[in-house]
Amino acid sequence: KAGVTQTPRYLIKTRGQQVTLSCSPISGHRSVSWYQQTPGQGLQFLFEYFSETQRNKGNFPGRFSGRQFSNSRSEMNVSTLELGDSALYLCASSNRSSGNTIYFGEGSWLTVV
Amino acid sequence: AQKVTQAQTEISVVEKEDVTLDCVYETRDTTYYLFWYKQPPSGELVFLIRRNSFDEQNEISGRYSWNFQKSTSSFNFTITASQVVDSAVYFCALSEEAAGNKLTFGGGTRVLVKP
């Protein structure tokens, strides 16, 4: 059974550009969450989608957005990139709305220059 | 609001020593879930264990064991007879029933196992 798949794995962007990251959850999982990991702030929750609806949102500016498709695949977008957006972005999936195991992908390493 | 504290930022041991990682949590929810994840240098968070708030039974899985105590809001993790491959950052996390699958993470504990 394939795990959570994230693309791209590594990318470099310039300040002011935008970026889209993609996540394919484990087959059958309807919940997809996104996290940002930086050395200074640690692991922080961005948002969660369940059956194409955003259920929960973390404390991030509106430049961070996401969506989920009918096949449960999800994308997150960051517009007007800032140097501080350089981070590891992790996607996670679960097969229930709460209380079950949450599995993570390998992450997308974003560097903003 | 929920909070997870891992007081130890880094632990260094020699191979075959035991190492215990501390995790203390805060939540107002009566139904919640606790997790431990391992993060090797590659970045992926590897799931280790999940416990719900109604299950205080401690668990042993191979060289790993977990001690969940609601009375002290702690969910500690022990690696017995550590190996070099155990070197990684370990994260404790909490999710509340009311918050869906949102995880609140502790700051992580870096474990370095020297040969």
Image (tube, coloured by chain):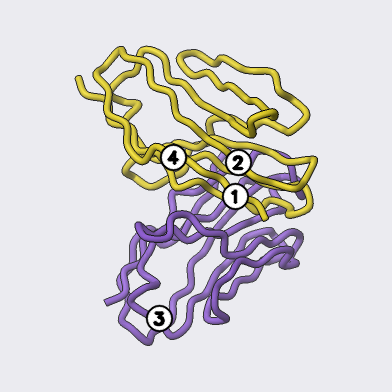
Chain colours: A purple, B yellow
The answer as to whether the residues below labels 1 and 2 share one chain is yes
Q: Distance from label 4 to label 2 (Cα)?
A: 11 Å
Instruction: Tell me the SS state at disc 3.
Output: loop
Q: Nearer the viewer, residue A101 or B33?
A: B33
Instruction: Tell me the SS state at disc 2.
Output: strand
Q: Is residue A28 above or below residue B53?
A: below
The numbered disc on residue B3 is 1
For marks 4 and 2 on the same chain, the one whose residue lies earlier in the sequence: 4
Q: Is residue B45 left or right of residue A56?
A: left
Q: Position of residue B103 (x, y in %)?
A: 61, 50
Q: Amino acid at mark 3?
A: Leu
Q: Which residue is mark 3?
A: A81
Q: Is residue A78 left or right of residue A83?
A: right
Q: Amino acid at mark 4?
A: Ala
Q: Amino acid at mark 2?
A: Tyr
Q: Nearer the viewer, residue B85 or A76?
A: B85
